[in-house]
Image (spheres, rainbow, N blue to C red):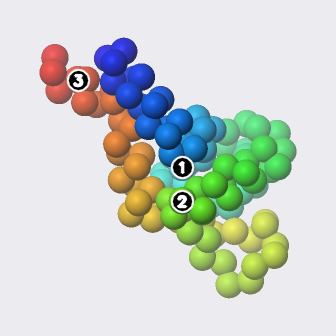
Protein backbone atom coordinates (compact mmCIF):
# COMPACT_ATOMS: atom_id res chain seq x y z
CA UNK A 1 0.00 0.00 0.00
CA UNK A 2 2.89 2.39 0.71
CA UNK A 3 4.18 1.97 -2.84
CA UNK A 4 0.77 2.78 -4.28
CA UNK A 5 0.43 5.83 -2.05
CA UNK A 6 3.81 7.13 -3.22
CA UNK A 7 2.79 6.49 -6.84
CA UNK A 8 -0.30 8.62 -6.29
CA UNK A 9 1.75 11.43 -4.75
CA UNK A 10 4.17 11.36 -7.69
CA UNK A 11 1.28 11.45 -10.17
CA UNK A 12 -0.26 14.44 -8.38
CA UNK A 13 3.11 16.21 -8.27
CA UNK A 14 3.76 15.65 -11.99
CA UNK A 15 0.29 16.95 -12.84
CA UNK A 16 0.62 20.01 -10.62
CA UNK A 17 -2.46 19.05 -8.62
CA UNK A 18 -2.37 19.52 -4.84
CA UNK A 19 -4.06 17.44 -2.15
CA UNK A 20 -6.47 20.35 -1.67
CA UNK A 21 -7.34 20.21 -5.39
CA UNK A 22 -8.13 16.50 -5.04
CA UNK A 23 -10.46 17.26 -2.13
CA UNK A 24 -12.20 19.94 -4.21
CA UNK A 25 -12.52 17.49 -7.11
CA UNK A 26 -13.98 14.87 -4.76
CA UNK A 27 -16.64 17.31 -3.56
CA UNK A 28 -17.56 18.32 -7.12
CA UNK A 29 -17.82 14.66 -8.17
CA UNK A 30 -20.21 14.00 -5.30
CA UNK A 31 -22.14 17.30 -5.51
CA UNK A 32 -22.59 18.20 -9.22
CA UNK A 33 -23.64 21.82 -9.69
CA UNK A 34 -21.97 23.02 -6.50
CA UNK A 35 -20.43 26.50 -6.20
CA UNK A 36 -17.10 27.54 -4.68
CA UNK A 37 -18.67 28.94 -1.53
CA UNK A 38 -20.42 25.65 -0.79
CA UNK A 39 -17.17 23.73 -1.38
CA UNK A 40 -15.47 26.05 1.12
CA UNK A 41 -18.14 25.32 3.73
CA UNK A 42 -18.09 21.55 3.16
CA UNK A 43 -14.31 21.38 3.48
CA UNK A 44 -14.26 23.81 6.41
CA UNK A 45 -11.74 26.19 4.84
CA UNK A 46 -13.32 29.34 6.23
CA UNK A 47 -12.98 31.61 3.19
CA UNK A 48 -13.84 30.98 -0.43
CA UNK A 49 -10.45 32.39 -1.41
CA UNK A 50 -8.99 29.16 -0.01
CA UNK A 51 -10.48 27.17 -2.92
CA UNK A 52 -10.21 29.72 -5.75
CA UNK A 53 -6.77 28.59 -6.98
CA UNK A 54 -7.76 24.94 -6.80
CA UNK A 55 -10.91 25.52 -8.83
CA UNK A 56 -8.88 27.51 -11.38
CA UNK A 57 -6.31 24.69 -11.63
CA UNK A 58 -9.01 22.05 -12.08
CA UNK A 59 -10.65 24.18 -14.79
CA UNK A 60 -7.27 24.68 -16.51
CA UNK A 61 -6.58 20.94 -16.62
CA UNK A 62 -10.07 20.25 -17.96
CA UNK A 63 -11.05 18.21 -14.89
CA UNK A 64 -14.13 20.33 -14.16
CA UNK A 65 -16.32 22.84 -15.99
CA UNK A 66 -18.30 25.87 -14.93
CA UNK A 67 -21.77 25.80 -16.49
CA UNK A 68 -23.02 29.19 -15.32
CA UNK A 69 -24.61 31.45 -17.91
CA UNK A 70 -23.03 34.66 -16.64
CA UNK A 71 -19.34 34.85 -15.87
CA UNK A 72 -17.85 37.24 -13.37
CA UNK A 73 -19.94 36.34 -10.34
CA UNK A 74 -18.12 33.55 -8.54
CA UNK A 75 -21.06 32.94 -6.22
CA UNK A 76 -23.04 31.76 -9.22
CA UNK A 77 -20.61 28.99 -10.21
CA UNK A 78 -22.19 25.74 -11.34
CA UNK A 79 -19.29 23.29 -11.18
CA UNK A 80 -19.41 19.84 -12.75
CA UNK A 81 -16.79 17.17 -13.19
CA UNK A 82 -15.65 16.34 -16.72
CA UNK A 83 -14.68 12.83 -17.84
CA UNK A 84 -10.97 13.70 -17.50
CA UNK A 85 -11.59 14.67 -13.86
CA UNK A 86 -13.35 11.41 -13.08
CA UNK A 87 -10.61 9.44 -14.81
CA UNK A 88 -7.87 11.31 -12.93
CA UNK A 89 -9.63 10.88 -9.58
CA UNK A 90 -10.19 7.17 -10.18
CA UNK A 91 -6.52 6.73 -11.05
CA UNK A 92 -5.66 8.02 -7.56
CA UNK A 93 -7.84 5.53 -5.70
CA UNK A 94 -4.99 3.35 -4.45
CA UNK A 95 -7.01 2.21 -1.43
CA UNK A 96 -9.44 0.22 -3.59
CA UNK A 97 -6.64 -1.27 -5.71
CA UNK A 98 -4.78 -2.44 -2.62
CA UNK A 99 -7.88 -4.26 -1.31
CA UNK A 100 -8.07 -6.31 -4.51
CA UNK A 101 -4.82 -8.05 -3.59
CA UNK A 102 -5.96 -9.06 -0.09
Nearer to us of marks 2 and 3 is 2
Mark toward the start of the polypeptide (1 vs 3):
1
Badge 3, how many Cα within 10 Å: few under 14, some, many 20+?
few
Do callouts 2 and 1 mark residues in contact (Cβ within 8 Å)? no
Give how far across and how far down residue 66 sits, in percent: 61, 71
Q: In this view, does 60 lie above or below 38?
A: below
Q: In this view, does 18 lie above or below 86?
A: above
Tell me the residue that label 2 is attached to.
Answer: 61
Badge 2, how many Cα within 10 Å: few under 14, some, many 20+?
some
Q: Which residue is drawn at 46% across and 31% down?
A: 10
Tell me the residue that label 1 is attached to.
Answer: 25
Q: What element carries label 2?
A: loop
Q: Is residue 39 above or below residue 4?
A: below
Q: Residue at x 40, y 54 (%)?
A: 86
Marks 2 and 1, how far apart at CA? 12 Å
Give how far across and how far down residue 92 sits, in percent: 39, 38
Q: Which residue is drawn at 35% across and 45% down?
A: 90
Tell me the residue that label 3 is attached to.
Answer: 99
34 relative to 76 in the view: left or right: left
Nearer to us of marks 2 and 1 is 2
Give how far across and how far down residue 46 sits, in percent: 82, 39
Q: In this view, does 20 lie above or below 60?
A: above
Q: How many marks?
A: 3
Amino acid sequence: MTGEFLRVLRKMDKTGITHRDVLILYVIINRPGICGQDITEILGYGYRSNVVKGIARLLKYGFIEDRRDVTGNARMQILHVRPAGTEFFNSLKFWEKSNEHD
